[in-house]
Amino acid sequence: MTAARRPLLIGALAAAVTALVASAAVAVDAGNAGAVPGSIGFLSGSSPTAPSLPGTVVNVSLADMGGAMMGQGSGMMSGGSMRLSADRATVPHGTVSFLATNGGSINHEMVILPLPAAQSVGARPTGADAKADEAGSLGEASNSNGKGVGQGVVPGASSWITVTLAPGQYELVCNLPNHYTAGMYTQLTVT
Ligand SMILES: [Cu+2]
């Protein structure tokens, strides 16, 4: 009866392997939850894809130097330690959508500011709050895995915003405290 017993043995092995894989997955989840309190919802959810965005789409990358940047808001950042970059420097006027993705290790955002003719990119003064003046802002993407204004884009998440831009010069910035002076700005020309 060996021919009849072999399928039973294989079935038992498969069940054992399945049980092992399941318990390993549970262990990994528990490890993540313990290591990153407060981020459980983000870690357990798959990264949702952004909706189909209208107009010209600009992909914006938000970045920092990971573990070296733990002093958020403490004034420890030096120039150039964070980055905001876009995949295009020029777009035609009209409907423009921005998809900002945080590839860094701390929260970021993207704010669209007009750039006065006499002003250089990256040269805005910052106040006592270590932020640049947002007067004239045309919109922002600071909502984790959502559109528009939120509480900041958490690491690994994206935010998006669609605006109508007239021809001119603009500056895309991250305006969390100290992030602008740390290098989070880039120029956008609208033709
Ligand atoms: Cu930032």
Image: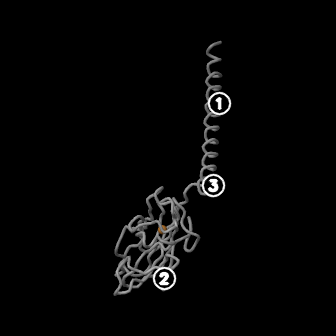
Which residue is rendered at x = 47% and y = 64% of the image? 101
C-alpha distance separating marks 2 and 1: 62 Å
Secondary structure, mark 3, is: loop
Q: Quarter of the image for the C terminus: give it.
A: bottom left
In the rendered view, would you say 66 is above or below 13? below
Q: Is residue 73 above or below residue 8?
A: below
User: What is the secondary structure assignment of the residue under circle 1?
Assistant: helix
Horizontally, residue 54 falls left or right of residue 5, namely: left
What is the crowding at mark 1: few (fewer than 14 residues within 10 Å), some, or many (at least 20)?
few
Residue hosting label 1? 15
Would residue 118 appear left or right of 100 to someone viewing this image?
left
In the picture of the structure, the residue carrying the numbered disc 3 is 37
- The kind of residue on which mark 1 rests is Ala
Task: Tell me where residue 155 appears, x and y as whole percent.
Answer: 52, 60
Which of the 4 image quadrants contains residue 45?
bottom right
Residue annotated with mark 2: 133
Residue sitting nearer the eye, 14 or 39 = 39
Please determine whether, in this image, residue 94 is positioned above or below residue 64.
Answer: below
State whether residue 143 is above or below residue 121: above
From where the camera sits, is residue 113 visible? Answer: yes
Could you tell me the amino acid type at mark 2? Answer: Asp
Circle nearer the N terminus (2, 1): 1
